[in-house]
Amino acid sequence: MRTLPGATFPLMSSEKAAEPGTGKPPMRDALVAAAFQLFLERGYEQTTIDDIVTLAGVGRRSFFRYFPSKEDVVFPDHERCLADMTAFLAAGTDDEEPVRRVCDAARLVLRMYAENPTFSVQRYRLTKQVPGLRAYELSVVWRYERALAEYLRRRFAARRDGTLQADVIAAAVVAAHNNALRSWLRSDGRGEASATVDHALAYVQSAFGGTPVPPAGEQPEDVVVVVSRRDAPLWRVVQEIESTLGRG
Amino acid sequence: MRTLPGATFPLMSSEKAAEPGTGKPPMRDALVAAAFQLFLERGYEQTTIDDIVTLAGVGRRSFFRYFPSKEDVVFPDHERCLADMTAFLAAGTDDEEPVRRVCDAARLVLRMYAENPTFSVQRYRLTKQVPGLRAYELSVVWRYERALAEYLRRRFAARRDGTLQADVIAAAVVAAHNNALRSWLRSDGRGEASATVDHALAYVQSAFGGTPVPPAGEQPEDVVVVVSRRDAPLWRVVQEIESTLGRG
DNA sequence: GTTCGCATGGCACTCAGTGCACTCCTAGGG
DNA sequence: CCCTAGGAGTGCACTGAGTGCCATGCGAAC
C-alpha cells in the first residue's frame, strides 16, 4: 500500500488553498483520483476508506471532511451541477415555454457529463454494477427531477392538475435524458451526445410541450387538417400532426 | 427496555412455523411491529437494531435473517408486490393496449398501499422526513419502473425509438401514480385512492396511450378533422383532438 | 512575537452488517 | 424408540462506514 507520489496531485497548483466556491481544493481532487484508481483496480466494495486515504496520503478524517459518504466521491460534481440547474431555472422569464425550459435545464446535466467523457464512462461502468452506487445515483437524479418539477409547478400554478402535469413532465424529461445519456455512455462516449439527447427530448416535447421546434424559416399552414383512422392510437395521431406540420 | 408481552404478536397464530411462501412467519411480523413502534416513538435514526430485537424479544442475528438491512423493515411487502406486478405483466396477452396494461400494473401497487391505510400513512410520514429512507424508497420505486419499462420495451420492440418511448412512458406512469398516491397519503388515507390514481393515469394515457377510455357505447367519428390556429401549442391541438373524439 | 482562524490529523466510539459455529427442535427413517 | 439430517434461531467476534472531540500545525493579521 504505497503512497501516491507527490507529483500526481499538484499541491503546487495555482489554487494554493482550499477556497470553497472560487477554486477546487487540490486535496479533494486527490481523493477523487485515488478513489477512482482503486475502484477501477479492485472494485468499489473491495476498497475501504482507509485504502483511499492511504493512497492519497492524507488522514482518514479528511475524507469525510470533503465527502459526507463513500458514495459521494463517485459523484463529485453533481452538487454544483444541481445548483447550476436551479439557478438556470430561477433565471428564466415567464414568457418562455415551460417544457422547453426544463428540457434546456436537462441539457445542462448532459453537458456536465460530456465535459469529461472518460470519467463519465468509467463512473457509468461502476454504477452499473454496484447496487449501492445505483441506489445513490437514483437519489441524485431524484433531486434533479424535483428541481424540474418544482419549476413546472410554479409555471403550471394556474392550470388544472398543474402539480400532476409538472410531476409527470419532469419525470418524462428525466427519463428521456437518461435514456439518451446511457445510450451515449454505452458507446464509450463516442458520437455526439447532444444530438441523442435532443432527439429524446423532442419526443417528450411532442407529447407534452408547446411547439417542439419553432418553425423559424418555414411557417406551417394556417389550417391543419388531420384525418385519422378510427381507433388509431393517440401517439399515431400526434405523429401525423407533426409530419403534417413538417417536423418529422 | 422492556420486552414486548407475548400477546402482542400472536405466536399462537394459525401458522405455527415459518413457512416461506405459504404463510408469514410470525417472527417477521413481530420485528416489523417492534420496529415501527420504536420508529414512531423516537425516530428511525435514533432506533438501533439492538433496540428492535430487544423489544421483539429475539436475537439480533435473527433480524438480518429476515431483513437484509435496517431499511428493509420499513418496506416489508414491496418484494412480494414487485413479484406480483412482474407476474401480472408477464400474464398479459399481446392484443392489449400496452400503456393501459402498465397503468393497470401501477394500480396493483396502489392497491397494496390501500390495503393498510394506517400503516401506509405512518410509513409515508417516516419516509418523508428520513433522508435515508427516502433514498431507499427511490430504489424500490425504481425497480417498479424498470419492470414497467421492460414490459413496454418488449411491446415496443418493433417501434422506432421503442426503448426511448418505453422508458419515458414508464417514468410518466410511475410519476402519475406517485403523485396520486402521495396526495392520498397526505390526506391520511381518507377518500378514494383509486379515483385519484385513475385521474392521474388518465392524463398519462391521454398523452401517450391509445384509446384512454374505450368508447364502448358511443363510437367516435370515422374521420376526425382538426382545425388549428397557426402557432397554437401542440398540447392545445391534442386537447382539441381529444374533445373532438369525445374524451374531454 | 502573539494570536486568531482554519485545514488537517489522530483517536475513540457507535452502529450496521457478516461469517461462523453452536444449540435446539422437528421430521423421518431404521 | 433411537438416531440423524436439516433448518430456525442465537451468540460472538469482526469489518468497515461515519461521527465527535481535541490536538497540531501553519499562514495571516495585529
Image (cartoon, coloured by chain):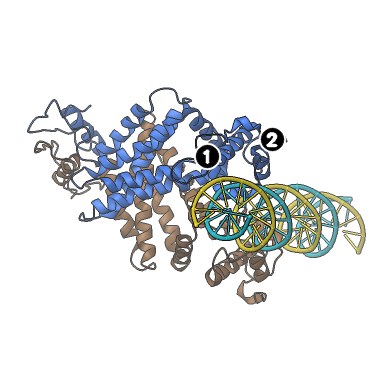
Chain colours: A blue, B brown, C cyan, D yellow
In the image, taking residue B125 as reference, residue B31 lies left or right, namely right
Numbered disc 2: secondary structure: loop
Q: Nearer the viewer, residue A146 or A235?
A: A146
Q: Quadrant of the N terminus of chain B?
A: bottom right
Q: Quadrant of residue A88?
A: top left
* Residue type marked 2: Thr
Neighbour tally class for label 1: few under 14, some 14-19, many 20 plus, Cα within 10 Å: few
On whether disc 1 and disc 2 are found on a single subunit, the reply is: yes
Residue at screen point 50% across, 38% down? A15
- Image coordinates of residue A193 in percent, x first then y, are 38, 28
- Image coordinates of residue A110 in percent, x first then y, are 39, 34
- Mark 1 belongs to chain: A
Q: Residue furthest left?
A: A222
Q: Quadrant of residue B211?
A: top left
Among numbered discs 1 and 2, the one appearing first in the sequence: 2
Q: Nearer the viewer, residue D5 or B30?
A: B30
> Comparing marks 1 and 2, which lies closer to the viewer?
1
Numbered disc 1: secondary structure: loop
- Mark 2 belongs to chain: A
Q: Badge 2 is on which residue? A: A3
- Image coordinates of residue B217 in percent, x first then y, are 19, 49
Q: Badge 1 is on which residue? A: A16
